Image (spheres, helix red, strand yellow):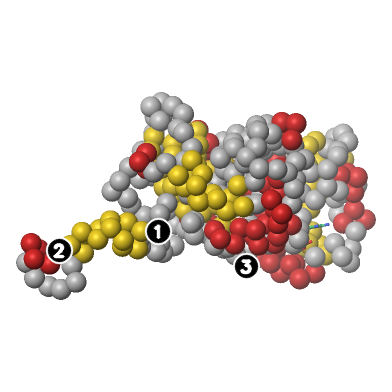
Amino acid sequence: MSSKMKAWICNEYGNPADVLQLNPDVAVPNLKEDQVLISNSCASSVSKMKAWVYDEYGNSQDILKLDADVPVPNLEEDQVLIKVVAAALNPVDDKRMLGLFKLTDTPLPTVPGYDVAGVVEKVGSQVKNLKVGDEVYGDINEKALDHPKENGSLAEYTAVEEKLLALKPKVLSFTEAASLPLAIETAYQGLERSGFSAGKSILVLGGAGGVGTLVIQLAKYVFGASKVAATSSTGKLDFIKSLGTDLAIDYTKENFEDLPEKFDVVFDTVGQCDKALKAIKEGGNVVAIIGSVKPPASLFVVTSNGSVLEKLNPYLESGKVKAVLDPKGPFPFSHAVEAFSHLQTGRAIGKVVIHPIP
Ligand SMILES: NC(=O)c1ccc[n+]([C@@H]2O[C@H](COP(=O)([O-])OP(=O)(O)OC[C@H]3O[C@@H](n4cnc5c(N)ncnc54)[C@H](OP(=O)(O)O)[C@@H]3O)[C@@H](O)[C@H]2O)c1
């Protein structure tokens, strides 16, 4: 979107006929965290937008370019056009950019970004519930690795199927909302898949990461875990305890698989299946989202689904489950490459978010 707009302004008090002047060069107001920008002109009249784009596979530092002339995506019947307010990064963005999924990827060029929070600007003819002005959030790619969209969320606009979205909980900022979809849906689907239920114990490998922080909270406050254990490095032990971890294990000092205590479920976000299998009780289960696995462990890939967000919205509204934002962020849109560099360290705490956009 342009940074200038037409507006009627007056520089002195007086009769409107005398003092009102049409100025085509007024700065578009800056957005505060709790505000939305409302436009009197329909987005359909905006045909170009700013977006981060790559047209070859490689490292984000080498290939990601800011382009001010990207076509606003066309809307399909079941989609809404979102004016993006905040977007979050995920390791899958980075792996896709490196070309690790090129066999099932959409042809280049690509605007990266799975997670979005923003305002509905336009609705397709088959959209049933969402309307212009709704504040929404979601993971824009139903299948993370199977032909994800060429127009992702690191842009001023993105087009998304209504079924992948939910209304943003009012208590959450756009930055907080953008941090959640892919990670919280992964956490929820993994817990369901493992057969997790009230009264069971769980060990979360990678408790401080984007997914791990949410597995800890969902296991404890949504599923009713009897005990939550989680691994992290020394400096993050207090942090994972603050999320609801009962037993915080410093993986730099202790081998969790050698502890006498065993668990009903291990949720592996690190890729340590062999060790995880040694930490379950007889009849226990390992669910993994990365690495290679062997039975009874299972590996799965998240499916984006707005109804999971709707189900979890009451826990977010009540504050029982909280968005966890990496303290180095949010990164402004112009600093997306730095944000990717931070994610690539593998040391991020919770989620790395891009805001404001643009
Ligand atoms: N299959 C799926 O559907 C799916 C969905 C989402 C994510 N994933 C994958 O799952 C992995 C995790 O994703 P994410 O978003 O949570 O990543 P992330 O946010 O980048 O994870 C960073 C965190 O990992 C922790 N960590 C690194 N090595 C560790 C270890 N050996 N033990 C314990 N913690 C460790 C770090 O804490 P310390 O500094 O304390 O080590 C850091 O806080 C990624 O590979 C991602 O691609 C898969």
Q: The residue tagged with tag 3: helix, strand or loop?
A: loop
The three-letter code of the residue at mark 2 reads: Leu
Which tag is nearer the camera, tag 3 or tag 1? 1
Q: Residues within 10 Å of mark 1 (few under 14, many from 20)?
A: few
Residue in the picture at 44% in, 62% down? 33
Whole-angstrom CA distance, mark 2 to mark 1, is: 22 Å
| In the displayed structure image, the side of residue 117 where residue 8 appears, left or right | left
> Which comes sooner in the sequence, label 2 or label 1?
1
Q: Residues within 10 Å of mark 2 (few under 14, many from 20)?
A: some
Q: Is residue 289 visible?
A: no
The three-letter code of the residue at mark 3 reads: Pro
- Compare residues 259 and 79 and report the one nearer the observer: 79
Relative to 95, say whether 252 is above or below: below
Q: The residue tagged with tag 2: helix, strand or loop?
A: loop
Which tag is nearer the camera, tag 3 or tag 2? 2
Query: What number is the disc on residue 20?
Result: 2
The three-letter code of the residue at mark 1 reads: Ser
Residue in the picture at 83% in, 47% down? 271
| In the displayed structure image, the side of residue 11 where residue 127 appears, left or right | right
Residue 209 is situated, as x and y percent measured from the top left of the image, at 71, 56
Whole-angstrom CA distance, mark 3 to mark 1, is: 28 Å
Query: What number is the disc on residue 327?
Result: 3
Query: What number is the disc on residue 3?
Result: 1
